[in-house]
Image (cartoon, grey):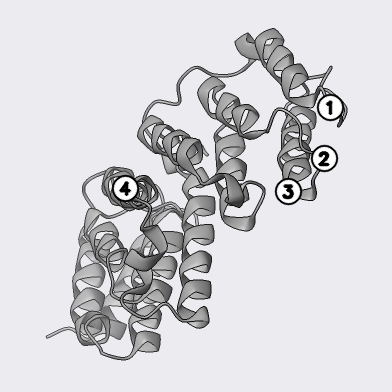
Amino acid sequence: MKTLSTLLAANALALMAGHAAADDCGACERGKLCAPHTEEERAVLEQLAPALASKAISERIDALREVAELTMEHENAPSEAVAKVLAAGCADESLRVRSIAIDLLTEGQEPETAVVAITLVLAEIHKGYAGGNLVPTLTGEEMTPASVAQAMRYLRLTLRVAGRVRDDKVAGLLVRILKITPTEMRGQPVAMATCDSLLELGTRDSVAAVVRHLTPWEDTREVRRVHDALEVFALNSDLDGYPEWGEEARNQWKGWLRRNKRALPAKLGKWRPESD
C-alpha cells in the first residue's frame, strides 16, 4: 500500500511534468480530479476522519483547515468531496467550528456545494431574526455573556464572509436579513457586516437595501457608519455625486442610487470563485 508521502511525491512529479502553476493542475478538470490528486484527497480525508469527529474543538478546526488546503494544489478544479466536508462543519455544534468552516468554504472551494451550504446558514439566520429568537437559538439554554458574545462573533463573521460568494441566492438572502435586522442593531457590528457584504456584492438591490437601512434622520454614530460605508462604496466604484452626511442624507442617497442604477449590475448569476 502506498504511503501518503509517496502519494504526495507522485503528485508533485505529475504537476512538474505538466508544467502546471503552483496553484493549478493541468490534468485536473472541473468535476474530475487527476489520478494523483484523487488518491491524495482520498488518503488525506481518510486520515483526518477521526480528527473531524473528535470531541476536541481544536482538533476539528485543525482538521478542517487541512481539508481546505487540499484545494490549493488544484484551484482550477476545486473538489466536491472537500467542499462537502467543510459544509458539514457549517452545522457543527460549536459556533467556533462553524465560523471556521464557513470562512474556509467561501475561499475558492467547489461553488455548487458552497452556495447550498451558505444559503442554508443564511436562511437559518433569517428565520431566527423573523422569529425573534436568533441569539437564544445559537446559544442554547444558557444565555451567559460569554455565549452571547460568541453568538454575535459567529453572526458577524458569517454575514461578512458571505459577501465573497457572488451569487444571486446569497445576495437575496442578505437583502432579506438586513431588511428584518432589529432597529437597535442598526450600525452595530453584526448589521454592518451585512451592509459591507451587500456593498461588496454591489447589485442594485443589495445597494438599495443598505440605503433603506439608513433612518430618515438620526444624527448618531451608528447611522453614520452606514452612510460612511455607502460613501466608500461610491468612491471605490468611481460613482460621483454621493451626498454629504446630514439631515437629507437618506433621501439624497436614494436620488444618487436612481442616477447610478444603470452602472450597477442587476444580477450576479452563479458564483464562480476563479472569476472573483
Report, in whole angstroms, how far the alpha carbon at label 3 lies from the one at label 4: 25 Å
Name the residue tied to disc 4: 127
Residue 247 vs 131, above or below: the answer is above
Q: Which residue is at 80% across, 30% downward?
A: 235
Above-or-below relation of 170 to 1 = above
**Earlier-in-chain disc, 4 versus 1:** 4
Contact between labelled residues 2 and 3, with CB atoms less than 8 Å apart: no
Q: Residue 248 vs residue 108: left or right?
A: right
Q: Residue at x 39, y 72 (%)?
A: 95
Q: Which residue is mark 3?
A: 222
Mark 1 vs 3: CB contact within 8 A: no
What label does residue 219 carry, if any? Answer: 2
Q: Earlier in the sequence, mark 1 or mark 2?
A: 2
41 or 97: which is nearer to us? 97
Residue type pointed to by label 3: Glu
Mark linked to residue 247: 1
Q: Which mark is residue 221?
A: none
State whether residue 182 is above or below residue 73: above
Badge 4 marks a residue whose secondary structure is helix
